[in-house]
Image (spheres, rainbow, N blue to C red):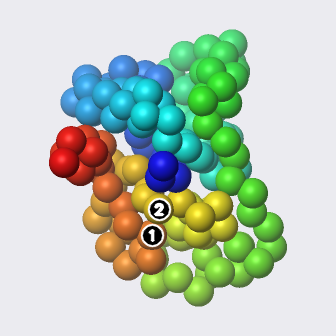
Amino acid sequence: MARWLVDTDVLIDVALGRESFVGPSREVIQLLRERGETLLVAWHTISNFYYNLERPQDAAFAKDAVAQLLEFTEVAKTGTEDAHYALTLPIPDFEDAMQVAAARACDAQFILTRNVRDYVDSPVPALSPTDALAELSR
């Protein structure tokens, strides 16, 4: 069984039903859960997820979505060493570097993200929901 760190964008797409992205994102998360794969999120993903849901909806919606998220994901255990590691990565967006550091800290084999291009220099391979579905069907 593989370990997958799920990036915030995929989670927001599912929670808000973003028309252009929700299909593959929902499908791959469901498939990974059915297969018993481990789904993880970085600690900071929870607050990013909450605030991105609260703005278009409300606090009750956002809290409920976070509670649901925590039903099927584990929070990657990270610390000071991982923050230092994120600073050394050749990834321009520090939030993405933090995702990579969290993936490394929890021994994730993949990062599931809609923004694969942001992870070109990541030591942990990043797959889009569509690419992950193709990979899982092999």
Marks 1 and 2: in contact by CB < 8 Å?
yes
Residue depicted at 62% across the width and 14% down the height: 61
Q: Which SS class for mark 1?
A: loop
Residue 120 is situated, as x and y percent measured from the top left of the image, at 32, 73
Check disc 1: other Cα within 10 Å, few if <14, some if 14-19, many if 20+. some
Q: Residue at x 26, y 26 (%)?
A: 23
Most extreme residue toward the right is 80
Q: Quadrant of residue 119?
A: bottom left
Residue 109 is labelled as 2
The residue identified by callout 1 is: 124
How dense is the environment of label 2, judged by Cα within 10 Å: few (below 14), some, or many (20 and up)?
A: some
Amino acid of disc 2: Gln
**Residue occupying the point 69% across, 46% down:** 75
Asked if one can make out residue 113 in the rendered structure from this viewpoint, the answer is yes
Residue at coordinates 50% horizontally, 35% vertically from top-left?
A: 36
Q: Amino acid at mark 1?
A: Val
